[in-house]
Image: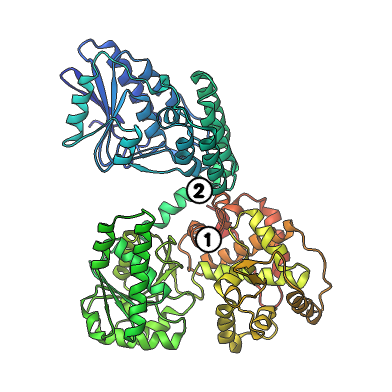
Amino acid sequence: MNTSPIPAVRCHAQNDVLVIEIHNPPINAGALEVRRGLLQAVESLECTPEWQAAVIIGAGATFMAGSDLKEFGKPLEDPQLPAVIAAIEACSKPIVAAIHGAALGGGFELALGCDARVADEKAVVGLPEVTLGMIPGAGGTQRLTRRVGIARAIGLICAGTRVPTLEASRLGLIDHIAQGDLRTSAVQFARQLQGRKCRVAEETVPQESPQQIQKAQEAALRAGRQRPPVVAAIEAIKAAATQPIAQALQAEREVFNRLRLGAEAHALRHLFFAERQAMKPSVDDAPRPFSRIAVIGAGTMGSGIAIASLDAGLPVLLMEQDDAALERGLQRVRDHYAQRVSQGKISVEAATEREARLSGATDWQRLGDADVVIEAVFEELAVKQAVFRQIDLHAKAGAVLATNTSYLDIDAIASVTRRPGDVIGLHFFSPANVMKLLEVVRGRETSPDVLATGMALGKQLHKMAVPCGNAFGFIGNRIYDAYRRQCEYMLEDGAWPEDVDRALQDFGFAMGPFAVADMSGLDIAWRMRRARAATRDPRERYVDVLDHLCERGRMGRKTGAGYYCYTDGKASTASDEAVRGLIVDASVRRGVARRPVLPEEITRRVMLTMVNEAAWLLAEGVALRATDIDVVLVHGYGFPRWEGGPVHWARQQPRSALQCDMEFLVQASGHGARLGNISLLLDV
């Protein structure tokens, strides 16, 4: 029995052209065995007179969709990718990259090191290293810049843009688009290059005005929030025009090695793997087939869900209770596509095709054709139950019945139907056609194939679908609710709203909790609080500042005042005397002597609160995996990606200090606060 490993790189000759094939499924990552195999193949090409050129191609569905990220947290073994690319450039015979699927990161750097690039029409290329906390480390900043110029290279590299074949060809990143079989086309192209070498590294950087470069740099720094990888990438790209190639390549590699071992890259790699784990099926059952979607409720959320479904190629029925409301919803969708066309984001033909798949109705009988019915009406249990009674009467047998709810009990909604096994929660985030997160909530009786269908639908809608159990707030809002309460406690302790918001923005959140509350509308939280008032333990620590703001008509941005005041839509930089008076009154009633609350304390209390609630979510089975919690917080709640999520943050803290601080925090949070078992998060 032959137990020898299958080689990661296999070679065979097509007459005078050597075909070098990468075999490292599923994405042909540039792992050590791949690098060794490529280097050996290039050496064989050089010393074999019969072979006059070579083609590098990937087996399976892709060329090389990146390096092996699992190697990046430890010392890299030789040969490293720069050595492989140097051998390709030093080889006296031309080597062509044949690209299908994706050539990303090290895969695209490998392709740029070849003498030419041939791609099929569906390929994508790009350098996403900055989004992983690094910079390209095998010549990407130098060779890409020599093809597209400094300004465009800054835009592409700092955003980690994936460039499709046609655009890549226009930019000079692809030399030939294969019309038929990619391998055949690449071999023919390689024969045409016989006797010639075309090294991108020897090209000169295109001339640009200083203004173009400055504009691109400012835009990249703004979009990248001046994170270290963005700053470093810009410096490396600009060096292409000022330093000899060998010096620039060495400097690039040194920066790459420093950043890949840093905390930011470590956090982003953690998140990269967490995202892929979250998207894996959590049940073995196959999803039910679906091809038609019905969305009930044509408001902002329902219209957004409809747009996301149309963008995914699905026919959509949008339903409302009367013709006027339906027409407003349909017009929202039409306006969206008209805006996309005017911005040049999609063609007129694409917009027309998507709108043609949209229909509207007020007649419940029309539900009978839908494979998945998504309810997106007012966030009130009685209202949703009334809708589900109608859905139960009119939806066909086997249809998946989904509720878009942020907090409500899925089982209570399913209980009014005769088929609770068909009911699932699909918690979209607003705007639903933009936000990537989708919590897929399983009820007590949800059938496994229905859960699988929810996950499959999320994937088709290009969402980050995360499975979770049925509990108040699910994963995200459960943690956000605890986080918000802790921030309110800090108001009573001595902070002002702007102190809290500023500290958390400085940590990396897109917005602080009080600015978010004003933007969402304080009446939403107020309504939820009143609904839960009867079950609230009077001994629980409860801050009523928001309640008093709403009683005074300060509902946030939409009323011109909330925690902050708004003039012409612009927020004041600090809370006013009315808000401060309510906060001081709350402190007095609590018997709290107000004191300065420093940014470091604000940030740590928030993080400890998130970690504690995460431990409970895992213990209760609401979250399937600890890393799912990080995915939810990053994609739905503005948690900074470069911190990896609250679970990753906790794993970087000294365990004894973390435990001690959490015990103190729970004690300070008052009656009913519970200490979670953090070992569930840390012991992995």
Indicate the amino acid at tag 1: Leu
Q: Which mark is residue 499?
A: none
Is 569 placed above or below 251 here? below
User: Secondary structure under badge 1?
Assistant: helix
Mark 2 vs mark 1, foreground winner is 1
Along the viewing direction, whichever of 108 and 440 lies nearer the viewer: 108
Q: Amino acid at mark 2?
A: His
Which color scheme is applied? rainbow
Q: Earlier in the sequence, mark 2 or mark 1?
A: 2
User: Residue 311's quadrant in the figure?
Assistant: bottom left
Circle 2 residue: 270
Q: Secondary structure at mark 2?
A: helix
* Tag 2 and tag 1, C-beta contact below 8 Å: no
In percent of width and height, residue 350 lies at 27, 58
Residue 336 placement (x, y as % from top left)? 37, 65
Mark drawn on residue 633: 1
> Which quadrant of the figure contains the N terminus?
top left
